[in-house]
Image: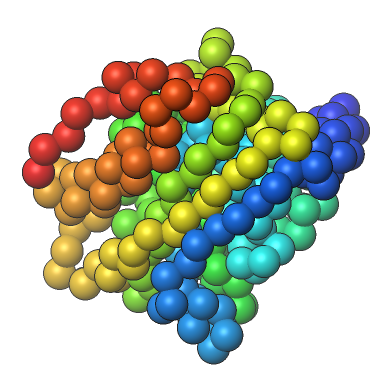
């Protein structure tokens, strides 16, 4: 009950804040066409960008995987109130059951979202779940580049999460798609993992605008070479 109440409170605060934001987004034509045709796809993002992206869940008819932890239950309540569907599980607890539940939701008509370095990190290190879902569902992956001109930064959190401030300007650019993995490809293969990780790290670097307020130094991002 406590986590539910906290989730409702977080939703009210988030809604009030998000009404003040000035948001623009760019979508590849293939993504817009998939939305029109109701063809399923996967959206991928770093865990720290999650709070800036919550408002898009209804537009993209998203389902997502949520940790069974106390914080996860708060997030599940918030996501449901935002219009998302959730499956409970994580890479560390209930992962297989959670992924199966997520696959069922996609087959029922939703798209799915992955915070690819969650639930506990390490930060900017891709986990294989998003690629496993892509292979099983034969779904392409789009990934986010998020720019925000002013934000509250949770510096003590492992994922360097941020929440846009009132009247912030947000620019959300979806990139891709990375085509679905074939049955012959292994989602745990370091080369396969590295391919998407490299693309997402580059998108994150491109979102770091020189001179932008309240944005951490891009040196915090790891170097990655294929």
Give the residue at the far left of this rendering. Answer: 226
In the rendered image, the vertical position of residue 25 relative to residue 139, given as above or below: above
The picture quadrant where one finds residue 6 is: top right
**Rendering coords of residue 56 (x, y %):** 65, 57
Q: Nearer the viewer, residue 69 or 106?
A: 106
Q: Nearer the viewer, residue 220 or 212?
A: 212
The picture quadrant where one finds residue 13 is: top right
Residue located 32% across and 57% down the image: 131
Residue located 62% across and 28% down the image: 150
Residue located 41% across and 78% down the image: 30
Q: Nearer the viewer, residue 67 or 134?
A: 134
Q: Quadrant of the N terminus?
A: top right
In the rendered image, the vertical position of residue 171 relative to residue 119, given as above or below: below
Give the residue at the far front of this rendering. Answer: 211
**Rendering coords of residue 25 (x, y %):** 56, 58
Visible residue check, residue 11: no
Count every numbered label the image shows and give the total: 0
Residue located 70% across and 47% down the image: 22
Visible residue check, residue 108: yes
């Amino acid at each position: 009950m406590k986590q539910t109440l906290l989730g409702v409170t977080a939703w009210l605060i988030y809604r009030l804040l998000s009404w003040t934001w000035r948001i623009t987004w760019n979508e590849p034509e293939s993504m817009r066409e998939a939305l029109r045709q109701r063809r399923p796809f996967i959206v991928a993002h770093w865990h720290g960008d999650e709070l800036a992206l919550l408002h898009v869940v209804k537009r993209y008819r998203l389902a997502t995987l949520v940790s069974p932890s106390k914080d996860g239950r708060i997030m599940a309540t918030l996501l449901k109130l935002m219009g998302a569907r959730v499956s409970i599980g994580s890479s560390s607890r209930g992962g297989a059951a959670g992924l199966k539940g997520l696959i069922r939701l996609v087959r029922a008509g939703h798209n799915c979202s992955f915070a690819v370095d969650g639930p506990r990190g390490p930060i900017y290190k891709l986990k294989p779940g998003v690629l496993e879902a892509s292979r099983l569902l034969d779904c392409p992956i789009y990934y986010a580049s998020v720019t925000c001109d002013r934000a509250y930064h949770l510096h003590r959190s492992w994922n360097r999460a941020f929440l846009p401030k009132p009247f912030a300007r947000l620019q959300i650019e979806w990139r891709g798609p990375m085509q679905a993995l074939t049955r012959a490809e292994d989602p745990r293969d370091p080369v396969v993992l590295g391919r998407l990780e490299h693309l997402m790290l580059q998108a994150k670097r491109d979102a770091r605008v020189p001179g932008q307020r309240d944005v951490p130094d891009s040196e915090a991002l790891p170097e990655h070479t294929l």
